[in-house]
Image (cartoon, rainbow, N blue to C red):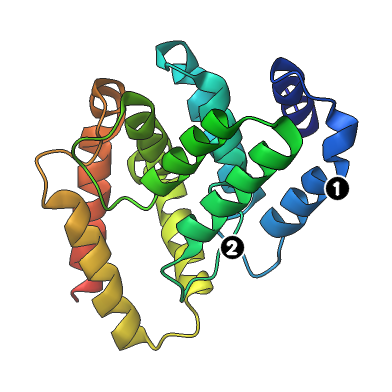
Amino acid sequence: MDIRERWDKLLLRLNSNPIMWEKVYRLILLQYTDAKRTYHNIEHLNCCFRHFDKVKTLLTNPDAVEFALWFHDFVYVPSSVSNEVLSANIARKYCRDFLGQENFGEEVFQLIIATKHLETTNLQDDCEFIADIDLAILGADLENFVKYENNIRKEYSFLGEKQYRSERLKVLSSFIMHDYIYLTPYFRKSLEDKARRNISCLIKCLNK
């Protein structure tokens, strides 16, 4: 399924006319194809959708999760700590203005906030799944994991090497300090071991 077909089918399931959303769709593509985004781009979005397709039968509200994925990195400024909140607010506004669904919009808002990866307990099941989907790259094969790390470095090119390594080590260490990186049994079974190996290897490299 190509990305446009996915978008249109989602809107039809939500009883909304895709034509009404044409400007929104173009704006989404504009955001995710920004040349400065070397990781948080359309490739990452498609990767999220591939993992979503594998687990959607396990979700309570797959349409809300899919809608949230479209917007979870809508706003992305590497130096900002407000990306998820801003993205979530925009998504919620579109749900209210175009779908007329306050409850759905609030659910989408909470799903996007979960991709901030600050809360690891007391999350609703679908929030746990979208958080894991967003971090699935950590358990990728070595070639794709190295590519991911290189692309993250490019997005933070405004940082000097020493500062980048220091900040990156903090993020990576926060992932492996917990008993599990992933929150759901599905992702723990399929990606946990690979993710831990990848992160441990990267931490060693950054500490050299």
Quadrant in which the N terminus is drawn: top right
x, y (%) of residue 176? 16, 50
Q: Is residue 49 visible?
A: no
x, y (%) of residue 177? 11, 52
Quadrant in which the C terminus is drawn: bottom left
- Of 137 and 10, the residue lying toward us: 10
Q: Is residue 9 visible?
A: yes
Q: Earlier in the sequence, mark 2 or mark 1?
A: 1
Q: Is residue 17 above or below residue 75?
A: above
- Of 195 and 201, the residue lying toward us: 195
Residue at numbered disc 1? 23
* Mark-to-mark CA distance, 2 and 1: 24 Å
Binning the other alpha carbons within 10 Å of mark 2 as few (below 14), some (14 to 19) or many (20 upward) gives many
Secondary structure beneath label 2: loop
Q: Quadrant of residue 13?
A: top right
Q: Which residue appears at 49% of the width and 85% of the height?
A: 158
Q: Which residue appears at 46% of the width and 47% of the height?
A: 144
Q: Can you tell which mark lies on residue 195?
A: none
Instruction: Count numbered badges in the picture.
Output: 2
User: Type of residue at label 1?
Assistant: Lys
Residue at numbered disc 2? 38
Q: Is residue 129 left or right of residue 45?
A: left
Secondary structure beneath label 1: helix
Q: Which residue lies most toward the top here?
A: 57
Q: Which residue appears at 66% of the width and 48% of the height?
A: 42
User: Type of residue at label 2?
Assistant: Thr
Question: Which-is-in-front pick, marks 2 and 1?
Answer: 1
x, y (%) of residue 49? 57, 31
Q: Is residue 203 left or right of residue 17?
A: left
x, y (%) of residue 131? 37, 39
